[in-house]
Image (cartoon, helix red, strand yellow):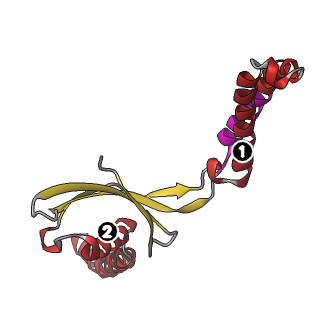
């Protein structure tokens, strides 16, 4: 019986070894394929450092400090044509309210129009409030379109006088992270 068991074990072992080798090979191939591409963080850091090489006072003094996770950026309602139109209407209404609030107090200059101005102020305030409520509702419901990526990047380097300074900036990138589209300093 033991002899039979030993023969069965010997016959199955090579098949299990072959299967295990295939599984290990498959896992290695998948790992190699997944690790070939650069991460978004790697792409962003390379672009930022390439820009810093041309803009820093002393590139040799550069020290990386930290970089936030690269995050998606979406369009904002305030930049849409609809928002700009509503904002323009709100501004014009506020301006008219201010104008009428001052002018209504000069009956000698404006005559009978001062009564019309005074009566118009509450109506204009209602219009302003309605426009603002509409703007707020549309802004809340707005679903922005994907516009690229952003990251906060902090580094240390020498200033023009040779002193070490810590600099933090926000960088925005295109959808493929192949170009910096905008940059602004977070320092005071």
The secondary structure that most of the magenta stretch takes on is helix
The percent position of residue 152, horizontal first and vertical second, equals 35, 55
State whether residue 172 is above or below residue 82.
below
Can residue 145 be seen from the camera position used here? Answer: yes
The percent position of residue 79, horizontal first and vertical second, equals 63, 53
Secondary-structure class at tag 2: helix
Name the foreground residue: 148 vs 185: 185
Name the foreground residue: 146 vs 187: 187
Q: Is residue 14 magenta?
A: no
Q: Which residue is mark 1?
A: 88
Relative side of 68 to 156, left or right:
right
Residue drawn where x is 70% and y is 47% of the image: 83
Residue drawn where x is 33% and y is 82% of the image: 18
Residue stretch in magenta = 127-143
Specify the quadrant that holds the N terminus. Answer: bottom left
Q: Which residue is mark 2?
A: 45
The percent position of residue 177, horizontal first and vertical second, equals 45, 71
Residue drawn where x is 65% and y is 48% of the image: 77
Relative side of 176 to 118, left or right:
left
Q: Is residue 138 magenta?
A: yes
Name the foreground residue: 138 vs 143: 138
Q: Residues within 10 Å of mark 1 (few under 14, many from 20)?
A: few
Question: In which quadrant of the rendered view does residue 52 lie?
Answer: bottom left
């Amino acid at each position: 019986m033991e002899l039979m068991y030993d023969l069965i074990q010997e016959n199955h072992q090579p098949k299990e070894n072959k299967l295990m080798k295939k599984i290990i090979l498959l896992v290695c191939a998948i790992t190699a394929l997944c690790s070939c591409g650069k991460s978004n963080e790697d792409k962003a850091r390379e672009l930022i450092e390439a820009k810093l090489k041309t803009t820093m006072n002393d590139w040799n003094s550069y020290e990386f400090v930290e970089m936030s996770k690269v995050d998606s950026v979406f369009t904002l309602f305030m930049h849409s044509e609809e928002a700009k139109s509503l904002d323009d209407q709100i501004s014009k209404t506020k301006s008219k309210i201010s104008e009428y609030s001052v002018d209504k107090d000069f009956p000698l200059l404006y005559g009978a129009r001062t009564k019309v101005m005074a009566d118009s102020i509450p109506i204009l305030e209602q219009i302003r409030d309605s426009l603002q409520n509409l703007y707020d509702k549309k802004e809340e419901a707005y679903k922005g379109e994907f516009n690229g990526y952003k990251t906060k990047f902090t580094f240390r380097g020498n200033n023009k006088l040779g002193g070490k300074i810590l600099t933090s900036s926000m960088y925005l990138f295109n959808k493929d992270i192949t170009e910096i589209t905008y940059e602004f300093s977070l320092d005071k």
